[in-house]
Amino acid sequence: MTFPLSRSLPRATAIWTRSYGTVQTSPSSASIASKIPQVLQDAVNATAPRTTWTRQEVQQIYETPLSQLTYAASTLHRRFHDPSAIQMCTLMNIKTGGCSEDCSYCAQSSRYTTGLKATKMSPVDDVLAAARIAKANGSTRFCMGAAWRDMRGRKTSLKNVKAMVSGVRDMGMEVCVTLGMIDASQAKELKHAGLTAYNHNLDTSREFYPNVITTRSYDERLATLGNVRDAGINVCSGGILGLGEGDEDRVGLLHTVASLPGHPESFPVNALVPIPGTPLGERKMISFDKLLRTVAAARIVLPATVVRLAAGRISLTEEQQVACFMAGANAVFTGEKMLTTECNGWDEDREMFERWGFYPMKSFERAGDGLAQRVVESVKEKESVKAASA
Ligand code: SAM
Ligand code: DTB
Ligand code: SF4
């Protein structure tokens, strides 16, 4: 189904429909239209997220010529989000290094000599002080990471993490943690403490995953995501680009998240930051067109999700970042540091936002429970109001 051309549509959608949907006026527009797969034309008209994607459909979307793909992504971005609002999230590593896992990209694995000094868990007060600084600098979400495989046998640590979660929530910020694998009861405890979101990345496709990590499986990762979802916590799960994977693996990752029972509320797109001493320490940065293509395809198959520019943003030019925002990315990590690597700072991000007409997203603007359902309802409501006044 295509929307009727009317004032009820955002202008971008109307132009899309005219060019690629019902009216084709010139041979050149017809030849462009022939490169737009039907699945993308349908996706652009969506008013609700769908979880029934086939891998072939995701591949067709991913393979669309980049200029058309970004245009489609931008159209959907405008329907489901305020395209000027970008979420500012600050990270803190609350337990650095000494991790038992063999993730071949990670500075914190004890299996590689990266020069990183392992630390004990940070005291609750220090973490709350850092969250206060993040808030004062404009961040509305605070994410705490720990270099752990899982939370088994970490009762005292969990108690402290819960105190951190409640403390940050009491400041009016969204709060996210990434602690490795968690079971159903740990997820419930974290929910009870006020946790907004849990980050646990699938990283890549199921097929490529064993080339990157051997000490825990893809299915174990999916089980943690299920525990998080069942506890009523928002899911933040994405990937890393530039691990040596191919287009088919980026498609595989997108297909996996887009066909989960509910889409993740947040999809981080990390570009590998090569860490000397790790098996991937010599890899070159993913090419920008592949990064942009992945961002745009994510916006299309996960229309209601916050797409997060994560690791590696520091290596992008300002113009490249803006191209990503225009193709659907709407969150960044900002502040003094990522986990162990450099991060774009608050001041430079604020200046960039001002130059290009973006502003920080408010807390809980996109992160509440039942997000997808609320988006559907508000899109329907807006359309019926506009249709009535047309
Ligand atoms: N230990 C927990 C875990 O693995 O789930 C939480 C921390 S872990 C560092 C969080 C995520 O950061 C990883 O899943 C990975 O996607 C990303 N990451 C880690 N090192 C990275 C690197 N060098 N470049 C890009 N992304 C990286
Ligand atoms: C995510 O997807 N990326 C962030 C956050 N979630 C925890 C972490 C990126 C880490 C980059 C490498 C480092 O700083 O060690
Ligand atoms: Fe450990 Fe997480 Fe790093 Fe893997 S990504 S080595 S689990 S800290």
Image (cartoon, helix red, strand yellow):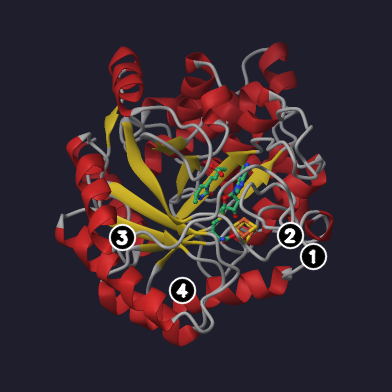
Q: Amino acid at mark 4?
A: Arg
Q: Answer with mark 1 or mark 3, whichever residue precedes in sequence.
A: 1
- Residue 214 badge: 1
Q: Is mark 3 within 8 Å of ligand 2?
A: no
Horizontal and vertical percent position of residue 102 = 74, 59
10 Å neighbourhood of mark 2: few (<14), some, or many (≥20)?
many
Horizontal and vertical percent position of residue 153 = 51, 84
Q: Is mark 4 within 8 Å of ligand 1?
A: no
Q: Answer with mark 1 or mark 2, whichever residue precedes in sequence.
A: 2
- The image quarter containing residue 61 is top right
Above or below, 182 against 277 in this view is below
- Residue 229 badge: 4
Q: Is residue 40 left or right of residue 237?
A: right
Residue behind mark 2:
102
Q: CA distance from mark 2 to mark 4?
A: 26 Å
Residue behind mark 3:
374
Image quarter for ligand 3 equals bottom right
Q: CA distance from mark 1 to mark 3?
A: 39 Å
Is mark 1 in CB contact (under 8 Å) with mark 2? Answer: yes
Q: CA distance from mark 1 to mark 4?
A: 25 Å
Q: Amino acid at mark 2?
A: Asp
Horizontal and vertical percent position of residue 278 = 75, 44
Q: Nearer the viewer, mark 1 or mark 2?
A: 2
Q: CA distance from mark 2 to mark 3?
A: 40 Å
Q: Nearer the viewer, mark 4 or mark 3?
A: 4
Q: Secondary structure at mark 4?
A: helix
Q: Is mark 2 within 8 Å of ligand 3?
A: yes
| Quarter occupied by the C terminus | top left
